[in-house]
Image (cartoon, rainbow, N blue to C red):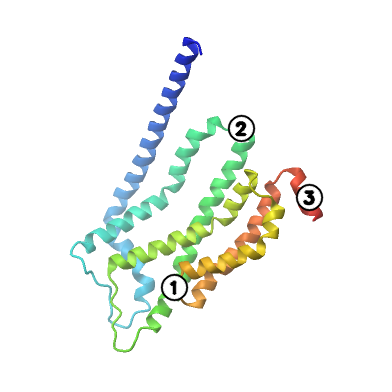
Amino acid sequence: MSQDAESALDSSLLEHLIELRSRLLRAIAGLMLVFVCLLPFANRLYAWLAQPLLDKLPEGANLIAIEVASPFFAPLKLAFFVALVGTMPWLLYQLWAFVAPGLYRRERKLAVPLLLSSLVLFYAGCAFAFFLVLPVVFGFLTAITPEGVAMMTDIHAYLNFVLVIFLAFGLSFELPVAMAILVLMGWVTPAQLRESRGYAIVGMFVLAAVITPPDVVSQLMLAIPLCLLYEAGLIASRMLAPAEERASAEES
């Protein structure tokens, strides 16, 4: 390699590193700005998050703080999580702005709908968990509490439990996007996905049993949407597959 070529390569690498640093700084600045703006409302956010459990507890029961610093750190942690989820479009935009110049036109046309779909599905999964799943889960847990036992949940333990549920449902709802990406990368075909439907359904019910509390209703509330999302992923994968694979899938 000539000296000029090496110099051009070094210059190009330096420009990419500078661009990467700029995008990272913008992403962090946006995240921290939203986080700082949410800090005055941290306790109110926690009260809103705790409502599904408080609605199911006996009259007069409340959450408790076992650790001395829990009343401070639990709302702070929740505010950061909300800021992270709320600024996800901005964070993904910074990633997209850095990666997009190196993509082909077809890759850029496909990436934008996939990114938007992943955001919408993640938010839909979190909303589904909060408005439908958590009331059922807490209703079940309070109903099976043995007589004479007061259900007194620590605010930090409650927060960790709810955030795990949010992440589990949010990521599970990404199933159609994951299937579409696998087809686009050529790792699987729509026909293979359709043939594996039975194994996938069994796996979804096993996953739902592991993620959700041990009541049948909450397990079904995750497994059934996953089955529907798998069917949506099959439709999307057939639409995104190369023409010859679409033709073979339609014939079969």
Q: Residue at x 69, y 54 (%)?
A: 192
Query: Within 10 angstroms of label 2, few (less than 14), some, or many (20 or more) residues?
Result: few
Element marked by disc 3:
helix
Q: Which residue is mark 2?
A: 104
Q: Which residue is mark 1?
A: 213
- Image quadrant of residue 70? bottom left
Q: Residue at x 60, y 67 (%)?
A: 202
Image label count: 3
At label 1, the amino acid type is: Pro
Task: Tell me whether the residue at label 2 lies in contact with that at label 3, contact meaning CB atoms closer than 8 angstroms.
Answer: no
In this view, the mark in front (2 or 1): 1
Q: Position of residue 45 (x, y in %)?
A: 33, 61
Element marked by disc 1:
loop
Quarter of the image for the C terminus: give it.
bottom right
Q: Which mark is residue 248?
A: 3
In this view, the mark in front (2 or 3): 3
Query: Within 10 angstroms of label 3, few (less than 14), some, or many (20 or more) residues?
Result: few
Please tell me which residue lies in front, 119 or 207: 207
Q: Position of residue 1 (x, y in %)?
A: 51, 13
Against 56, residue 202 (above or below) is above
Q: Reading the chain from its start, which is encountered first: label 1 or label 3?
A: 1
At label 3, the amino acid type is: Ser
Q: Reading the chain from its start, which is encountered first: label 2 or label 3?
A: 2
- Image quadrant of residue 10? top left
Task: Tell me whether the residue at label 2 lies in contact with that at label 1, contact meaning CB atoms closer than 8 angstroms.
Answer: no
At label 2, the amino acid type is: Tyr
Measure the alpha-carbon separation of dots 1 and 3. 42 Å
Q: Residue furthest top?
A: 3
Q: Residue furthest right?
A: 251
Measure the alpha-carbon separation of dots 2 and 3. 27 Å
